[in-house]
Structures are given as structure tokens and as C-alpha cells.
Image (spheres, rainbow, N blue to C red):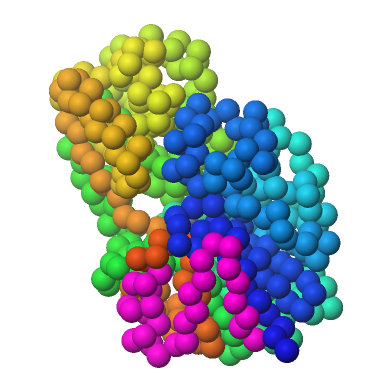
Amino acid sequence: MAHIRIEAVGGYGEVGKNMTAIHIDDETIICDMGMHMDHLLTHIPDSDLASHSREDMIRMEIIPDDSHIDVKRVKAIIPSHGHLDHIAGIPYLESRYNCPIYATPFTAEVLKRQFKDNGFKRKNKIFSVLYGKQIKLSEKITIEFVYVTHSVPHSSIVAIHTPYGTVCYANDYKFDDEPLGEISDYKRLKEIGKNCVCLISECLYARKEGRTPFEAHVKEQLAELMYKYNKKGIFVTTFTSHITRLQMIYDIAKSMKRKVMFLGRSLDKYALSAKFAKVTNMVDGVEMYPYKSQIKRKLKNLGNDKKNYVIVLTGHQAEEHAVLNSMLNGKLPNPFAPDDLFIFSCNIIPTDAIQKARAELELKLEKTHMVVHKDIHVSGHAHIDDLQMLVKMLKPKVVIPSHGTQEMMDAYVKNVAIPLKIEVKQIHTGESVKIA
Ligand SMILES: [Zn+2]
């Protein structure tokens, strides 16, 4: 009789709304309850989240369909890290469950704000858990978070220890050996590798050769550009949850003796989460202007003082209501002058809706005659060599690719599982597989 069954609730054969149910005998652990960000932008561009019901969100395929899950069996909900495609389904789905939510400190902070800022009521308690702490969920099941580098603080591989071996849930990671903080916990991963029965691994970049480039590379590029334009206005936009990147920008600005200004609600949310989760106190040294009225007032009186700041703003993916688009559309004062520096420290998320919006935004930016630099960025997702490194450390009996389209899952099989001679099982959203 099989004891462990892995069920793909969302994110298998698609990018977004990640959710996996791990059934161990008659008990279940849920890893992640995310949103499909592309479907969200297509259906609800105004981001008024709380006005939509769980049923609507499932119907629009913005969150996973967990209707069939027997909630009485579920022992815990475990978000792996703080990205919205892993946590933003929780406020809609958790009330049906009666179990704790365990997360690392930054993830727990962001999740709590996700409820509060959007006006959601929460039924279950969120526990903040440090790395290495073993949490016994039942007679048979113990879990722990193992630290890995990614593009948001306190990312983790979730290890689920059972009498039948350990299941590792690895969404998302890369192995950065020159990060701003700690390197990934290779030692613990190798220890877990003595008894790993199954690895569920992201496969987003399973077509990309080599190692994922390190963050240190971006710091050099950013510093070079910012120093070159030291006499001009300097504007930067990046992923607001990418605290490491924001810290880099902050550190470079301070080394140039410039002040730092964060414009936009989302920057406020993540920077404060980083403070309360004891990741960094950067926010104490930053002038924060989350709301449009505050931004308006500040920019109106800015004048030549602009050159004493590095100004970080929201809107890198051309979101309609973010600060950048509002400045270019005349809804906020436009502080841009010819020959100022504008940096996109991000990639463009490759969906039709976003690419179209970004193209329109760049046309408007051109008219400002600023010097615009794009793609000053490295990814937080594992390339082929990183994916292989994890398999070599964990030595799982079976691997299951997740967090990817069919092409990405196929690439994982071809570039990771076959060369390493590891048994692989492919499942798609709505399917499940027995593994032990
Ligand atoms: Zn992520």
C-alpha cells in the first residue's frame, strides 16, 4: 500500500497559483496557496482584492481550486516564501481549514499584511518559525524550513519528515554563493539527503544553461551606473519584495552621500515587513511616502533637492496605478528631467498583458529624454546547474518538476533528471501520484 501521495493542486503545467497537497497515510500537509499573477492582472487590474469571493477567484483561475480537499485531514498550511504566487491565495482559502499556518518570519509578516492591507478576516493562526526548528505536526509528521537563496528574504525548502522518508518542497530557489546575506544551508540539505524519498522542484529556468548569476554582479552594475550620473537625478524601480536589491540601492546611495526616498504602497509594505521580521532596518534610514497625497506634496516642493536623493518608485511592470505610470500620466507631479538616470532593476515578466503595457510605458519614458537602463537584474530562479546541485545534495528517489509550463517540465526531465539518472514523475494541476 502506498503511504505518500503528491497532489498537484496548482502550478503544474502553468506558471502561478502554486499549491501542493502532500498526503501521508490519512493526513495532509499543504505547501503554498498562491495566485496566478497574469490571470489576476487580466481579470482584476485595479487590484481591489477583497471585493472578490473565493468562488469567483477560483472560477477566474486566479487561485487554486482546492474544493475537493478533505480539510479535516490537513495538519498545516506551509507557505515556502513570501512571493504572491505562493501566498496570496491563502486569504481566500484558509477559512475552510482548521489548522495552523507555519512560515519563516519575513513570509509570516508579509502574509499578515496581505490580510490586513486588503481587509481580509483571518481564521487560522500564523506562526513565525526560525530555520532549523523541527515542528512536530502529528505522530508521523515533522517539518522544518531549510534556508536557500532566492529573490525575497527568508526563502526556504520545506522538508517534511515521515516514517517513509523525507519529502522536500523546493519552490523557489537559486544557489547564490556571493549573496548580500548568508549562502544556502548546503550542510543541512546534504544531511536530509540521507533519507529523501521525493523532491518537488521548481523548473522555471530548466532551459537555461549553467549557474544562475549571483546578485553581486548586479551590485557592481548598479554602482557603476549610479556613480556615473552622480550630478543628475537618479531614479530606480525594482521588485518591491526584493529586499536584497533595495538594500543594495540604499547602500550605494548612502556611499554617494545621497538620501533615499521610497515612493509607493508596495515598497512600504515590504520594507516594513523586513524590519519587523528583523531582516534589515533599512526602512529607518529611508523617507517613505506610501500614499499618493504624500507623494504629491513631496514632489511639488522637491526642486533641485532631487539631486540629493536616490528615488525608488513602484511600477517596473507598468502597473497602471503604480507611481511611475501615475507620474507619466500626469496624475502625480513629473520630476524627470533630460539626462537624469532611470534604472529598471528587474526583468519584464513575459506575459502578453505586461509586455504590451511596458512597451507603452517606455514610449512615454522616451519623451522625458532621460537615460534609461533596462534589465539591470539577475534572476532568483535556478538554472540547470543549480537544479542539478539540489538533486545531487538531496539524492531523492523520485523528482517531480513543478512551478512551470509543460515545456519547462519537459526541460527539467531532459536537462536534470535524465543526466543524473533520477526517476521522474510528471503531474499536472488536478492530478496526483503515489511515491512511497
Ligand atoms: Zn518566488
Q: Residue at x 37, y 72 (%)?
A: 410
Q: In terms of image quadrants, where is residue 80? A: bottom right
Residue 155 place in picture, x, y as percent:
54, 59
Q: Which residue is drawn at 67% across and 70% down?
A: 22
Q: How many labels does the image show?
A: 0
Q: Residue 145 colored magenta?
A: no
Q: Residue at x 50, y 26 (%)?
A: 46
Q: Can residue 246 be seen in this view?
A: no
Left or right of 393? Residue 66 is right
Q: Residue 434 colored magenta?
A: yes
Q: Which residue is drawn at 60% across and 52% down?
A: 64
Judge whether 289 appears above or below 214 on screen.
above
Viewer-closest of 213 and 172: 172
Viewer-closest of 356 and 337: 356
Judge whether 340 appears above or below 164 on screen.
above
Viewer-closest of 355 and 13: 13
Q: Can residue 254 be seen in this view?
A: yes
Q: In terms of image quadrants, where is residue 353? A: top left
Position of the N terminus by quadrant: bottom right
Residue 101 place in picture, x, y as percent:
73, 55
Left or right of 280? Residue 223 is left
Residue 157 place in picture, x, y as percent:
56, 68
What is the magenta range? 409-436
Residue 333 place in picture, x, y as percent:
35, 12
Position of the C terminus by quadrant: bottom right
